[in-house]
C-alpha cells in the first residue's frame, strides 16, 4: 500500500465500502450520462457546464473503479490517490489517466468556484473523460 493511500485511509478519506461492488454499473451509467450532458453543453457553447459535467463523468467512472475494489472516497483528491494505488501501481491503468483526472478536477474547480473556463478547456476535459470511461469499461469488463 503506497504512503498516500495509507494516509487517506487513516484519515478516513478512503473507507471500506462492501456494497460498492453492487453499485459499479450504476456509477458507470451516471458517468456516461454526465459525459453525454457535457457533450450537449459543449455543442451549445456552455463551456463552464460542459467542463463541470465532463469532470463528474470522470469522477463517477473513478468511483466505479474503486467501488469494484471495495472502497469509497470521502475526498476528490483521495479518489485520485486510490486510483494510483489500486490501478496504476498494479499496472492496470496508465498514470496519464490519473493525471488527466487531476487536471480535470482543477479545471472543474476553476470553472465552478472562480468562473474561469474556456472552450479549449472544456474540449480537453471531454476528451479526457471519453478516454477515462473507455478504459474504465475495459478494466471492469462491463457492457457499454
Image: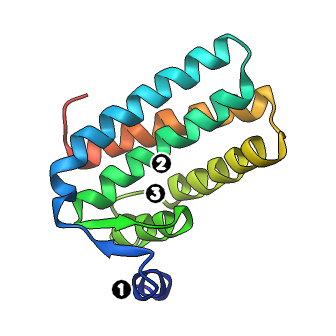
Foreground: 105 or 93? 105
Q: Kindly identify the residue that appears in the image at 33 percent across and 70 percent down.
A: 90
* Residue 44 figure quarter: top right
Q: Which mark is residue 94?
A: 3
Give the x, y percent position of residue 2.
43, 85
State left or right for residue 124 relative to residue 24. right
Q: Kindly identify the residue that appears in the image at 57 percent across and 42 percent down.
A: 55
As measured in the structure, the alpha-carbon distance from the residue carrying label 2 to the one carrying label 1 is 22 Å
State left or right for residue 77 relative to residue 2. right
Q: Which residue is mark 1?
A: 1
Classify mark 2: helix, strand or loop: helix
- The quarter of the picture where the N terminus appears is bottom left
Using the rendered image of the protein, determine whether residue 137 is visible from the camera's viewpoint: no
Q: Which mark is residue 59?
A: 2
Foreground: 116 or 62? 116
Query: Are there few (<14), some (14-19), or many (20+) residues within 10 Å of tag 1?
Result: few
Q: Residue furthest top?
A: 44
Give the x, y percent position of residue 62.
41, 52
Q: Kindly identify the residue that appears in the image at 47 percent across and 30 percent down.
A: 34
Badge 1 or badge 3: first in the primary sequence:
1
Badge 2 or badge 3: first in the primary sequence:
2
Amino acid at each position: 500500500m503506497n504512503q498516500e493511500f495509507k494516509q487517506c485511509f487513516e484519515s478516513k478519506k478512503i473507507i471500506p465500502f462492501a456494497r460498492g461492488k453492487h453499485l459499479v454499473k450504476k456509477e458507470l451509467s451516471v458517468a456516461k450520462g454526465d459525459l453525454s450532458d457535457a457533450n450537449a453543453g459543449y455543442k451549445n457553447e456552455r463551456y463552464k457546464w460542459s467542463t463541470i459535467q465532463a469532470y463528474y463523468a470522470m469522477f463517477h467512472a473513478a468511483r466505479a473503479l474503486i467501488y469494484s475494489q471495495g472502497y469509497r472516497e470521502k475526498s476528490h483528491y483521495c479518489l485520485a490517490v486510490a486510483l494510483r494505488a489500486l490501478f496504476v501501481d498494479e499496472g492496470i491503468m496508465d498514470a496519464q489517466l490519473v493525471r488527466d483526472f487531476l487536471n480535470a478536477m482543477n479545471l472543474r474547480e476553476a470553472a465552478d468556484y472562480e468562473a474561469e473556463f474556456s472552450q479549449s478547456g472544456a474540449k480537453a476535459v471531454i476528451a479526457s473523460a471519453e478516454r477515462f470511461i473507455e478504459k474504465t469499461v475495459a478494466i471492469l469488463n462491463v457492457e457499454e
